Amino acid sequence: MNPERAERAERAAARIRSNPEHARRLLHQMLRVRRFEEKCVELYSAAKIRGFMHVYIGEEAVAAGVLATLEPGDAVVATYREHGHALLHGVAAGAILAEMYGFEQGCCHGRGGSMHLFDAATRFFGGNAIVAGGLPVAVGLALADKMTGRSRVTVCFFGEGAVAEGEFHESLNLAALWQLPVLFCCENNLYAMGTALGRSESQTDLALKAASYEIPAWPVDGMDVLAVEEAARRAVSAVRAGSGPHFLELRTYRFRAHSMYDPERYREKAEVSQWLERDPIDLLRGAVEAAGELSETQWSEVQAQVDAEVQAAVDFAEAGTLEPVEELTRHVYTDRAATDLDATDRDATDRKRP
Ligand SMILES: Cc1ncc(C[n+]2csc(CCOP(=O)(O)OP(=O)(O)O)c2C)c(N)n1
Ligand SMILES: [Mg+2]
């Protein structure tokens, strides 16, 4: 082992020993996402889930590490690869899976599906299918918190493909200009569908792009959940303390295809194998075991708990029902019929008419 790696392993062991329960919890969280999504793939193949679906397998350390640093009331905005973020931010596994089945018991009554998970109660604001579409939403949420004086943080996850979009630059600029309480988390998995970062960006150091907007930014090993959590804790506490936006470039890798349809002609099998050697779950499990803080029994318990949660989610989704046809026009514009509008609303509406 090279000296840098050895020092890192030593620091990790010390951290694990200082709070072994927390380390086991991080392991549990990553495994929840992994097993849940493995089940989703199986259910997709069985045509229980249809439409587009993108899994996060390989990238679990990012969501698990960052979300471990949030407090109740903080908001999360993510992309279409968001099952894990929703799950770890507190949306019930059953409600997520039922949503993917298209059933009314889903977190969006089955109208959103895999790419548009949303849950106002936990302040999980998507599930955004448009690349970079979540960034202005996050900036708006953070602006609202700043204007109302609430000490909340909004975390925005997006892929490195988003940095090529105008919305990325507009959002970072305004967040910095107005010193908004938002943490930008760029999940750099090296590919945007089949396009490698170096084929689409002249500058591939993404933290540097954020720094050009005067936003404190740094890269993080996104396969090491302890490193992710440490960086996120530092960034989140600075954001919460009023130091304005922060940016993390989380260097990670997706082990599976971009979506369920992808012949993967753009990357070598050897590259995938190399990254598989740094599976974030295996890395943490190995470190916790090496620190003497994970017995065989404890690991079996973690797995059993996760398996039970996933099975319960499947049972819940399987028992789901489609929304009745009469409900189809609900949740489109407003639930209130024109006759329900009170006099003030009607006056205002009338005044706006040309
Ligand atoms: C504005 C926009 N352009 C194109 C697409 C099609 N599209 C879907 S996913 C994707 C790649 C995005 O890659 P990245 O942001 O790196 O996220 P990853 O899939 O790697 O997590 C593209 C181009 C889209 N959804 N939105
Ligand atoms: Mg990507």
Image: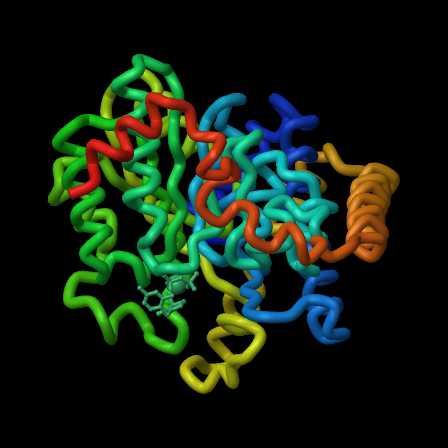
Query: Where does the image place residue 352, in percent across and percent down from the top left?
Result: 20, 36
Where does the C terminus fall, quadrant-wise?
Answer: top left
The answer to whether residue 167 is seen in the rendering is yes
- In this rendering, the answer to whether 80 lies above or below 155 is below
Ligand 2, by image quadrant, is bottom left
- In this rendering, the answer to whether 57 lies above or below 86 is below
- What residue sits 37% from the left and 44% below the top? 185
Query: Where does the image place residue 273, in percent across and percent down from the top left?
Result: 55, 73
Query: Where does the image place residue 218, in percent across and percent down from the top left?
Result: 28, 42
Residue sitting nearer the eye, 354 or 144: 354
Residue sitting nearer the eye, 157 or 17: 157
Furthest-top residue in this view: 149
- What residue sits 82% from the left and 41% below the top? 305
Q: Where, by quadrant of the figure, is residue 276 drawn?
A: bottom right
- What residue sits 60% from the left and 39% below the top? 88
- In this rendering, the answer to whether 232 lies above or below 251 is above
* Residue 203 appears left or right of 144: left
